[in-house]
Amino acid sequence: MLNGLSVDIEDWFQVGAFEHTIRRDDWDSLKPRVERNSDAVLALFERAGAKGTFFTLGWVAERYPALIRRIADNGHEVASHGWDHQRVFTMSPEAFRADLRRARQVLEDAGGQPVTGYRAPSFSIDKRTPWAHEILAEEGYTYSSSVAPVVHDHYGWPEAPRFAFRPVAGSALVELPVTTARLMGRIVAAGGGGFFRLFPYAFSRWAIRQVNGESHPAIFYFHPWEIDPGQPRVADAPIKSKLRHYSRLGAMEAKLERAIREFSWGRVDAVAASQSAMLG
């Protein structure tokens, strides 16, 4: 079973946990670490012999075009994470379309390859944005991986399907929700990120085996800052945000390499193509 391996390319100060603590206007004045951390991810993938998809902010691509070219030249997919990590449900349909176009242009210019995949910042396509998938289809995207079918304080669309579905009638667009698992009658998040970092590795192994055993691919994600224990600390962030963001950063890289070697992984566009064929 080919599982989807993905990286959400954003810097340490651009994450949802700090969106009310660090102003966008201050981003350019902060010490960037996204290039060095993304290069460390590329090295990890090279060691493990894996290919993946890098959902990248247009803001990052504009400032580090050589990084985007290295990602593409190493055989990975460059996909869109929007322009500057603004959640979809905070935008109007018109603003969302403009955000998509702006990010895609910069990503394609830097990477030299078409951008056909999209992931909403913080999985922010949900029941509040019935127009979002329609706009993605109109803009020519092949797939989206923007839905988290769970209950969560920052995001979630628990009523959404857990596995690949076509969100727009008459369109070939495929939505690939991030992986969840069934545990004691509940649906729980199991697709990577903080859950992978904080929970024992055995939980993620069990979850991936569960969905693969049901003939579905896992859709896994993480961020470059999650393998960077030396990143700056945001002292005035809420305690809950700091716990989520900084816990077990030092353990993440080894856990990732273990997971990548234990399961079969590939680019998300390849998974989307196989799922689209199965959906008919």
Image (tube, helix red, strand yellow):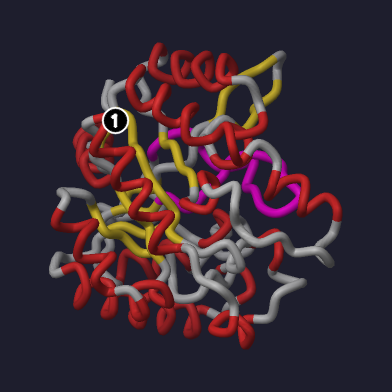
- Residue 4 drawn at (x, y percent): 33, 36
Q: Amino acid at mark 1?
A: Trp
Residue 150 is one of the magenta-drawn residues: yes
In the image, residue 134 above or below residue 92: above
Tag 1's secondary structure? strand
Q: Which residue is tagged 1?
A: 265
Q: Nearer the viewer, residue 19 or 143?
A: 19
- Taking the image as shown, residue 11 lies to the left or right of residue 279, namely right
In the image, residue 258 above or below residue 269: above
Q: Which secondary structure is most common in the magenta stretch? A: loop
Q: Residues within 10 Å of mark 1 (few under 14, many from 20)?
A: many
Q: Which residue is at 28% across, 20% downward? A: 1
Q: Quadrant of residue 154?
A: bottom right
- Taking the image as shown, residue 100 lies to the left or right of residue 243, namely left
Q: Quadrant of the C terminus?
A: top left
Q: Which residue is at 58% across, 68% downward? A: 14
- Taking the image as shown, residue 270 lies to the left or right of residue 43, namely left
- Residue 100 drawn at (x, y percent): 38, 75
Q: Which residue is at 53% across, 14% downward? A: 206
Residue range highlighted in magenta: 145-164
- Taking the image as shown, residue 13 lies to the left or right of residue 213, namely right
Q: Nearer the viewer, residue 271 or 21?
A: 21
- Residue 233 drawn at (x, y percent): 71, 60
Q: Nearer the viewer, residue 241 or 115?
A: 241
In the image, residue 63 above or below residue 128: below
